[in-house]
Amino acid sequence: FGLGNWNGAFNWDNKISGVQVLLAKLTSKQAYKDKVQGYVDYLISSQKKTPKGLVYIDQWGTLRHAANSALIALQAADLGINAATYRAYAKKQIDY
C-alpha cells in the first residue's frame, strides 16, 4: 500500500499519514510511530513556511494543509511522540 514511502501532504487524495497514525494506535508498532514522527519532524524542520510560520505545502488550499498537518501532529502527540513540540506546532498552525 506504499505505507513506507514518503507520502507528501495529508489531504483528500493522500491519507497515508492518517493511516500510519491509526496503525500506530491500533498496533503500537514502533515502525508506524517512526513514520509518523518522520513526517511531523519534516513538517516542523524542513517544510517550506511563510515568513510568519504558516506551513506552506501548496498554493491551492494553503490553510487546509496547515490544519491537516496540525491534526497529524496532535495525533502523534497523543501517541507520546514529542508531545510538547508537536502540540506547540499544531497550535501555531491553527492560531495563524
Image (tube, rainbow, N blue to C red):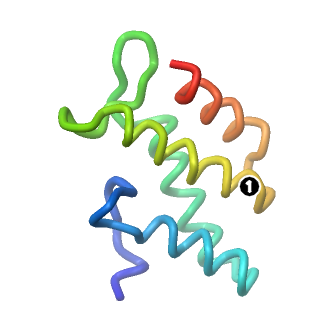
In the orientation shown, which residue stands out farthest toward the left?
59
User: Which residue type does callout 1 highlight?
Assistant: Ile
Residue at image position (67%, 48%) is 74
The quadrant of the image that shows the N terminus is bottom left
Specify the quadrant of the image occupied by residue 47: top left
Comparing 22 with 4, the one in front is 22
Taking the spot 62% from the left edge, 75% from the top edge, the residue there is 22
Question: Which structural element holds mark 1?
Answer: loop
Residue under pointer 1: 81
Return the x and y of residue 46 as percentages of the image width and height. 40, 37
- How many numbered marks, from 0 up? 1
Question: Residue 8: which quarter of the image?
Answer: bottom left
Residue 90 x, y percent position in the rendering: 61, 35
Question: Relative to 36, is 76 on the left or the right?
Answer: right
Vertical comparison of 74 with 96: above or below: below
Q: Image point 72% across, 75% down: which residue?
A: 25
In the rendered image, the residue lying farthest to the top is 51
Q: Residue at x 60, y 69 (%)?
A: 21
The percent coordinates of residue 87 (x first, y second) are: 71, 37
